[in-house]
Image (cartoon, rainbow, N blue to C red):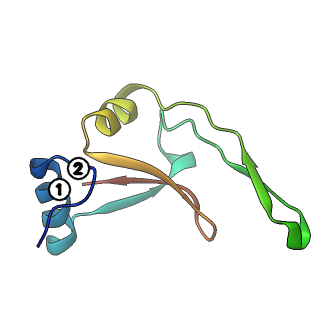
Amino acid sequence: MAGLRGFPPEKSAALQAAIANGTLKFQKGSEVPGYNTRTVITYFGEQGMSTSGYRPPTGAVKEAIDAGNAQAIWTEDRGDVYVTW
């Protein structure tokens, strides 16, 4: 499997291994101490939407993201999500 764009080879391999062996972990951002990001979505009918509410992660969450062992993401159906491997 090819490496993931933007990831160093060893981090790409670790993420791919977590996907393959089922150890990829998804958590609600609001349940993770230090996650801090709370996205607020405002919809404008057919004109689109805007987001606000970003606050940078702190502590162990920031360290894991900075080390390339986690990602903080937002999805329309789940909201703020913290993904670790």
Q: Position of residue 46 (x, y in %)?
A: 87, 73
Residue at figure coordinates x 49%, y 54% from the top left: 73
Tag 2: residue type? Phe
Name the residue tied to disc 2: 7
Residue 65 found in image quarter = top left
Tag 1: residue type? Ser
| Left or right: 29 as drawn, with respect to 2 | right
Give whichever of 37, 42 is nearer the camera.
42
Residue at figure coordinates x 62%, y 71% from the top left: 77
Residue at figure coordinates x 38%, y 49% from the top left: 71
Q: Is residue 44 above or below residue 6?
A: below
Q: Is residue 20 above or below residue 3?
A: below
- Does label 1 or label 2 sit earlier along the sequence? 2
Q: Position of residue 75 (x, y in %)?
A: 57, 64
The quadrant in which the C terminus is found is bottom left
Residue at figure coordinates x 11%, y 58% from the top left: 13
Q: Which mark is residue 2?
A: none
Residue 43 found in image quarter = bottom right
Name the residue tied to disc 1: 12
Q: Are marks 1 and 2 in contact (CB under 8 Å)?
A: yes
Give whichever of 50, 56 is nearer the camera.
50
Q: Secondary structure at mark 1?
A: helix
Q: Position of residue 5 (x, y in %)?
A: 26, 57
